[in-house]
Image: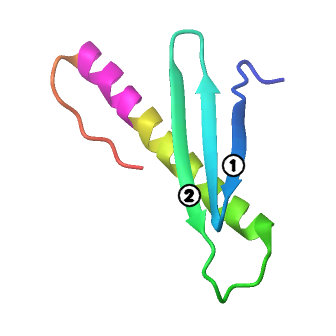
């Protein structure tokens, strides 16, 4: 059984040929919001799930970078010097 569970909510907004995904992670003391977009080219077939997949991947990537930045800030506060973390 897991000790902790985080749930990320991903919502989609579609307008014209663009799909936007918003990924939200709410923790006890912090809220993270990543977003990503995908644009359908005029010659592409109409397959909305492809735009959703791509926009969600970009939103989750944005969210993951925010989590790495937050972890770096916590480490810096503890160790008292700058750190650089990589994804």
The x, y position of residue 62, in whole percent, is 48, 46
Is residue 30 rendered to the left or right of residue 74? Answer: right
Q: Is residue 73 magenta?
A: yes
In the displayed image of the protein, which residue is found farthest to the top? 29
Q: Looking at the image, tell me whether mark 1 or mark 2 is earlier in sequence order.
A: 1
Q: Is residue 61 magenta?
A: no
How is the protein colored in the picture? rainbow
Q: Residue at x 58, y 47 (%)?
A: 60
Secondary element under disc 1, as helix, strand or loop, is strand
Is residue 33 rendered to the left or right of residue 55? Answer: left
Residue that badge 2 annotates: 37
Secondary element under disc 2, as helix, strand or loop, is strand
82 over 35 or under it: above or below: above
Q: Residue at x 60, y 81 (%)?
A: 41
Residue that badge 1 annotates: 13
Mark 1 is surrounded, within 10 Å at the Cα level, by few (under 14), some (14 to 19) or many (20 or more) other residues, namely: few
- As rendered, which of 17 and 77 lies closer to the eye? 17
The x, y position of residue 69, in whole percent, is 36, 34
As measured in the structure, the alpha-carbon distance from the residue carrying label 1 to the one carrying label 2 is 9 Å
Q: Residue at x 17, y 29 (%)?
A: 82
Is residue 76 rendered to the left or right of residue 25? Answer: left
Magenta span: 69-78
In the displayed image of the protein, which residue is found farthest to the front? 16
The x, y position of residue 28, in whole percent, is 59, 10
């Amino acid at each position: 059984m897991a000790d902790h569970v985080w749930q990320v909510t991903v919502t989609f907004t579609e307008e014209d040929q663009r799909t936007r995904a918003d990924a939200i992670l709410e923790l006890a003391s912090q809220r993270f919001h990543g977003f990503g977009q995908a644009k359908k080219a005029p010659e592409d077939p109409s397959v909305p799930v492809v735009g959703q997949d791509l926009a969600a991947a970009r939103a989750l990537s944005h969210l993951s970078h925010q989590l790495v930045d937050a972890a770096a800030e916590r480490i810096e506060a503890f160790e008292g010097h700058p750190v650089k973390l990589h994804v």
